[in-house]
Image: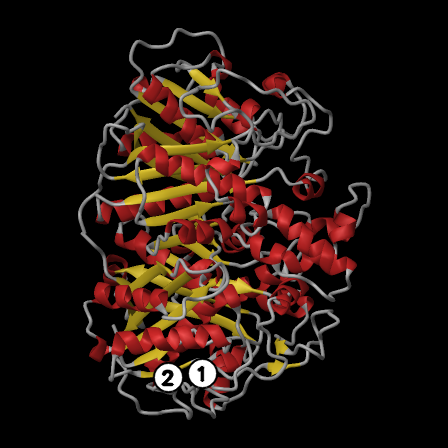
């Protein structure tokens, strides 16, 4: 029989906080992580500000509990910090961790270290410390390293569907539980800023040098960000057996493809519509039962228009409260889905809806607008979180109170 | 949700360092290599991709899209329900081009083509656009488990909808960057060898290969069916041969298959004297009595190389023949080949089992 899937813990690190408590405080006080870059070494540090975690790798090693840190890329370190907090918050025993699955999303693995040591690595005669990063161009490397660090043996998967990666890892973890392959899956994603990514997005001309403005008529593009988040998913059976009180239930999820263009969403938002619709169908919920949408809302012209149309098409005249939290964290790409899932969980727990910072001017194409100010004492039962990516990927997950 | 379904391979498109793109052939022409790098023997892409699009695509995207088209034509399917791809290093040649340009131009005046085509899910995305597949789309990049993750994903979805068709694919390219960066880890042999002699070597390392493969996986039998895929399992970093053997025994038991029923097993050893140790021990103990075939001398080693094993197993079952070039030692091909087992490893970390049966 199909198992229900519950969320029993989570962990997070972003530019607005190195754990859950710090993220919550920043969200409540409208503190954003946007600013000049001074950890990543790039010529764009002043011209293309982003949402950077102001900790150097040595400090991250301490936080991650790997003081020596040999071979750990920034991607692995951020992931490990969030992963350990998630394991602790769900009170998993070492045996439960060993028999869990780890599903992590990434866009570029350890490219940050690979780009830094590229010329040295391309000369096999050179010897030095850099050799620890020889395999960091492999995206799956970070997944295995994190699994090894915490002792996960049973199931390992790394997913890469660009900016929807961690939404898909949450989805796939839930599938494995539903089908009885796992009792527990720790799912999320991790993303470190790199010159590769910054220059890649810049070459696509979708980076705004100013603070991003999702769903605003003057929006000019996204800000990049870095971070990681992991959710602990447990089967109904495991929750009952351990007499745990779950934080929430993962009620539904949907993955579809826009099949429109390699790096752009369809103008009608077909993929967005389909993904949300699939998630709601799985949860057996009608549009009127959705209380909030954490939008993908990257603040690119294309995304917000497409997503906005998708939302309007699905919800008609009764669009729920929605906002994009990207101005807080920047677009954390592969980690965005799990980071925003954590923000949804915090919203459910604290009965708040996060504001869409920097929204001032209505888009004429849309008849709806996002939540501007923090809303408290909101009766939230079911929330959607959207994540879309290059390659036409559209994913949506539906989280409800347990 | 319905129970565990059956899974059938209805179509295959395989482009590898051997001439495998032609489904009418079965390893009749063998290409040899002597520099430890095996590259794909490709078809005429114009037969599969429209010429305007062709010009804009990187080599590996062409290989990938062509193999997807070969698969769909073979399956007689135009609109699969979803696309799931797997890769280890992705389009590393494209990633390298963008990276070099970025370093050489000092982060100025960059064009996005290589960045876009270097994305791991570029193939799954482009294929979706090409055949207008708006259904499920996912990409796994978990080193030596990526292809198994993708198969399992499709299998679980077929459990829910037996009539569905999933296009499950893999790609990895023999990128110079990977070759050079892994010299320090001795992933590839330091001395040049002839690929067909791979299993006679006694040194560290293997040979680099590449390939793109697509399989149409569905829950119902069809006249074109190649074989049934019974099950897939992964074992992460087994410490000993006994650990691996116990996992294999569990796997077989879960599928109600005894070792005696296995007609031929596909041995995924790589010719690496150090990293092959556990699998060789298994070969010489538990699997000793079973006829054995090997394949990495034909296609080289890469993260998603088990897709070659799946193609080989499916071909053996469909064509009811075992080419001499894959036989580990002389044995008489059984009158009926019913069951094929694949046991493989990637870098002595990612071990995987696949069980295939005549449909």
Task: Report whether B141 appears left or right of A322.
Answer: right
Q: Quadrant of the C terminus of chain B?
A: top left
Q: Residues within 10 Å of mark 1 (few under 14, many from 20)?
A: many
* Separation of marks 2 and 1 at Cα, in angstroms: 9 Å
Q: Secondary structure at mark 2?
A: loop
Which residue is tagged 1? A215
Q: Is residue A95 visible?
A: no
Disc ID at residue A366: 2
Looking at the image, which is closer to me, B148 or A363? A363
**Above/below status of A148 relative to B174:** below
Residue under the point 40% across and 45% down: B150
Residue under the point 53% across and 73% down: A331
Q: Which of the 4 quarters of the picture holds residue B6?
A: top left
Number of numbered discs:
2
What subunit carries mark 2?
A
**Above/below status of B223 relative to A11:** above
Q: Which of the 4 quarters of the picture holds residue B77?
A: top left
Q: Secondary structure at mark 1?
A: loop
């Amino acid at each position: 029989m199909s198992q229900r899937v519950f969320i029993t813990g989570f962990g997070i690190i972003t530019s607005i906080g190195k754990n859950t408590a710090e993220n919550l405080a920043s969200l409540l006080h409208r503190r954003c992580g946007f600013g000049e870059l001074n950890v990543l070494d790039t010529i764009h540090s002043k011209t293309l500000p982003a949402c950077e975690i102001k900790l150097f790798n040595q400090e991250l090693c301490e936080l991650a509990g790997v003081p020596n840190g040999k071979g750990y890329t920034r991607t692995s370190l951020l992931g490990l910090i969030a992963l350990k907090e998630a394991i602790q918050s769900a009170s998993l025993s070492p045996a439960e961790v060993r028999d869990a699955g780890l599903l992590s999303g990434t866009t570029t693995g350890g490219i940050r270290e690979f780009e830094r040591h590229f010329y040295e690595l391309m000369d096999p005669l050179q010897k030095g410390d850099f050799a620890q990063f020889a395999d960091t161009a492999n995206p799956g490397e970070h997944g295995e390293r994190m699994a090894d660090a915490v002792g996960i043996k049973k199931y390992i998967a790394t997913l890469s569907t660009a900016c929807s990666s961690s939404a898909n890892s949450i989805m796939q973890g839930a599938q494995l539980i539903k089908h009885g392959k796992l009792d527990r899956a720790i799912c999320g994603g991790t993303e470190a800023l790199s010159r590769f990514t910054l220059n890649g997005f810049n070459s696509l001309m979708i980076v705004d040098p100013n603070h991003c403005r999702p769903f605003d008529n003057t929006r000019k593009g996204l800000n990049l960000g870095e971070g990681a988040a992991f959710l602990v998913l447990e089967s109904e059976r495991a929750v009952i057996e351990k007499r745990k009180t779950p934080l929430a239930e993962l009620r539904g999820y949907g993955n579809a493809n826009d099949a429109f263009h390699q790096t752009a969403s369809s103008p009608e938002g077909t993929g967005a519509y389909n993904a949300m619709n699939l998630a709601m169908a799985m949860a057996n919920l009608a549009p009127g039962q959705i209380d909030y949408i954490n939008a993908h809302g990257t603040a690119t012209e294309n995304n917000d228009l497409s997503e906005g149309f998708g939302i309007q098409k699905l919800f008609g005249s009764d669009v729920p409260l929605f906002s994009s939290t990207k101005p807080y964290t920047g677009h954390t790409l592969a980690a965005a889905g799990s980071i925003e899932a954590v923000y949804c969980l915090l919203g459910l727990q604290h009965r708040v809806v996060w504001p869409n910072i920097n929204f001032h001017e209505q888009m004429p194409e849309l008849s709806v607008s996002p939540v501007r100010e923090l809303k408290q004492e909101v009766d939230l039962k079911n929330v959607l979180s959207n994540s879309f990516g290059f390659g036409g990927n559209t994913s949506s997950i539906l989280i409800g109170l347990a | 949700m319905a129970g565990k379904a059956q899974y059938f391979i209805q179509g295959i498109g395989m482009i590898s360092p051997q001439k495998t793109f032609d489904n009418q052939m079965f390893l009749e022409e063998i290409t040899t290599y002597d520099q430890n790098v095996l590259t794909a023997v490709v078809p005429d892409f114009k037969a599969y991709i429209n010429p305007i699009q062709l010009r804009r695509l990187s080599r590996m995207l062409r290989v990938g899209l062509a193999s997807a088209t070969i698969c769909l034509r073979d399956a007689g399917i135009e609109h699969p329900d979803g696309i799931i791809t797997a890769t280890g290093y992705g389009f590393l040649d494209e990633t390298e081009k963008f990276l070099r340009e970025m370093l050489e131009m000092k982060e100025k005046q960059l064009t996005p083509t290589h960045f876009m085509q270097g994305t791991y899910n570029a193939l799954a995305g482009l294929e979706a656009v090409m055949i207008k597949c708006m259904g499920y789309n996912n990409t796994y990049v978990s080193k030596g488990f990526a292809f198994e993750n993708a198969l399992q994903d499709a299998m679980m979805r077929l459990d829910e909808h037996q009539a569905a068709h999933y296009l499950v694919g893999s790609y990895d390219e023999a990128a110079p960057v990977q070759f050079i960066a892994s010299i320090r880890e001795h992933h590839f042999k330091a001395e040049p060898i002839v690929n067909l002699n791979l299993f006679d070597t006694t040194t560290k390392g293997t040979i680099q290969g590449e390939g793109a493969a697509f399989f149409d996986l569905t829950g119902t039998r069809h006249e074109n069916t190649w074989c049934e895929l019974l099950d897939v399992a992964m074992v992460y970093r087994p410490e000993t041969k006994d650990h691996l053997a116990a996992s294999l025994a569990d796997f077989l038991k879960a599928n109600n298959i005894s070792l005696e029923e296995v007609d031929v097993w596909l041995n995924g050893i790589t010719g690496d004297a150090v990293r092959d140790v556990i699998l060789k021990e298994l070969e010489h103990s538990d699997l000793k009595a079973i006829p054995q075939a090997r394949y990495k001398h034909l296609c080289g080693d890469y993260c998603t190389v088990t897709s070659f094993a799946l193609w080989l197993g499916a071909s053996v079952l469909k064509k009811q023949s075992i080419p001499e070039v894959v036989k580990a030692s002389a044995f008489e091909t059984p009158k009926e080949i019913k069951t094929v087992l694949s046991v493989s490893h990637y870098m002595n970390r990612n071990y995987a089992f696949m069980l295939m049966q005549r449909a």
